[in-house]
Image: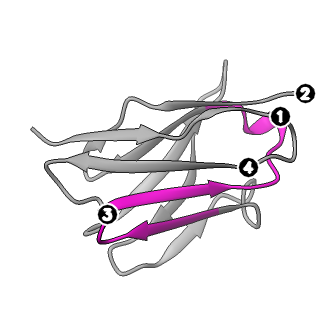
Amino acid sequence: QVQLVESGGGSVQPGGSLRLSCAASGGDVTLDATRWFRRAPGKHREFVAIISGAGVIQYASSVKGRFTISRDSVKKTVYLQMNSLKPEDTAVYYCSHKDLWGQGTPVTVSS
């Protein structure tokens, strides 16, 4: 059974950076669209970024210019580079590929 696994979350100070990774055991997330979402404490899940199978990229307005989604076809991994992090970026981040969801990786931005 294919499973998505996110990694790379952690705690950083405002202005810091993190890189999240999303890979599929027994599959390849780089072949089709993969999305990043996040759920902040007490809030609904929100879209963060998408990279399509063709490489078309879109971002939520709240992260545009600070986050970069990319993929490595050799490593079969999709990344979310997060720079200039703000406290409001604190959330559990999930990747989604087809109808699969990962378990999430927590990101905390705090001084």
Please provide percent x and percent y for residue 69: 55, 64
Say what secondary structure mark 4 lies in.
loop
Say what secondary structure mark 3 lies in.
loop
Image marks 2 and 1: residues in contact by CB distance under 8 Å? yes
Of the numbered discs 2 and 1, the one sitting upstream in the chain is: 1
Q: Give the magenta part as a residue range.
A: 68-91
- In the image, taking residue 1 as reference, residue 70 lies left or right, namely right
State the mark number for residue 111.
2
Residue 73, by quadrant, is: bottom left
Say what secondary structure mark 2 lies in.
loop
Image marks 1 and 3: residues in contact by CB distance under 8 Å? no
- Residue 31 vertical position relative to residue 11 in the rendered view, above or below: below
- In the image, taking residue 5 as reference, residue 9 lies left or right, namely right
Q: Which residue in the structure is indicated by mark 3?
A: 75
Q: Amino acid at mark 3?
A: Lys
Q: Amino acid at mark 1?
A: Pro
Q: CA distance from mark 3 to mark 2?
A: 34 Å
| Quadrant occupied by the N terminus | top left
Q: CA distance from mark 1 to mark 3?
A: 31 Å
Q: Which residue in the structure is indicated by mark 4?
A: 17
